[in-house]
């Protein structure tokens, strides 16, 4: 996916705006709107055990530390990182984080670390 469109509606009028993925840092799929980010640059107290309901035979999630070009760090679990793809999904390590999942644009990272046990 190189781009997608956001549609904004005001009354009977709708306008579409093209968003190019390469120009983004990430797409944050939030649980609720309007909550201030209280988790920026905060390392969780260890990595809680990630749950993957209904996927008993699925590969394990990998503890991942992401650092973006703007200095933000995100502690998360990843499954499908591939340096040759434009992006990948992570699940925040902090279960109280307002993000359900995050699609990370690979080119927006300055560092990625995988925590092995």
Image: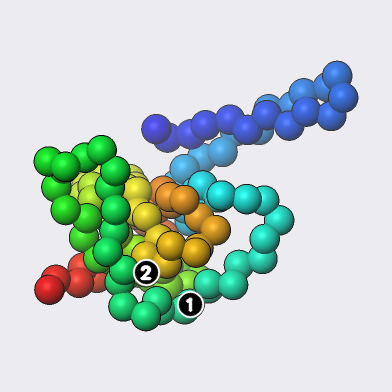
5 lies above or below 57: above
Q: Earlier in the sequence, mark 2 or mark 1?
A: 1
In the rendered structure, find residue 41 and report the number of the disc placed on it. 1
In terms of depth relative to the viewer, which is nearer, 70 or 65?
65
Kindly identify the residue that appears in the image at 29 percent across and 43 percent down. 53
Label 2's element?
Answer: strand
Please name the residue shown 47% across and 43% down the image: 21
Q: Relative to 70, is 104 on the left or the right? A: left
Q: Nearer the viewer, residue 29 or 31?
A: 31
Q: At 29% across and 53% down in the image, what residue appears?
A: 51
Left or right for 66, reference 61: right
Which residue is situated farthest in the right direction here? 11
Left or right of 13: which side holds 106? left
Q: Which mark is residue 3?
A: none
User: Quadrant of the image for the C terminus?
Assistant: bottom left
Q: In this view of the protein, can residue 83 be seen by the observer?
A: no
Front in this rendered view, residue 58 or 79: 58
In the rendered image, which quarter contains the N terminus? top left
Please identify the quarter of the rendering in which residue 57 is found: top left
Give SS at disc 1.
Answer: loop
On residue 75, which mark appears? Answer: 2
């Amino acid at each position: 996916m190189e781009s997608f469109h956001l549609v904004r509606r005001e009354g009977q009028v709708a306008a579409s705006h093209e968003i190019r993925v390469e120009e983004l840092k990430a797409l944050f799929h939030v649980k609720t709107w309007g909550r201030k980010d209280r988790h920026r640059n905060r390392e969780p107290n260890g990595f809680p055990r990630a749950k993957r309901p209904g996927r008993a035979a699925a590969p394990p999630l990998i503890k991942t530390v992401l650092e973006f070009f703007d200095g933000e760090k995100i502690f998360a679990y990843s499954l499908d990182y591939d340096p040759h793809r434009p992006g990948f999904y992570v699940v925040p390590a902090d279960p109280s984080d307002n993000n359900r999942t995050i699609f990370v644009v690979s080119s927006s990272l300055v560092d990625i670390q995988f925590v092995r046990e």
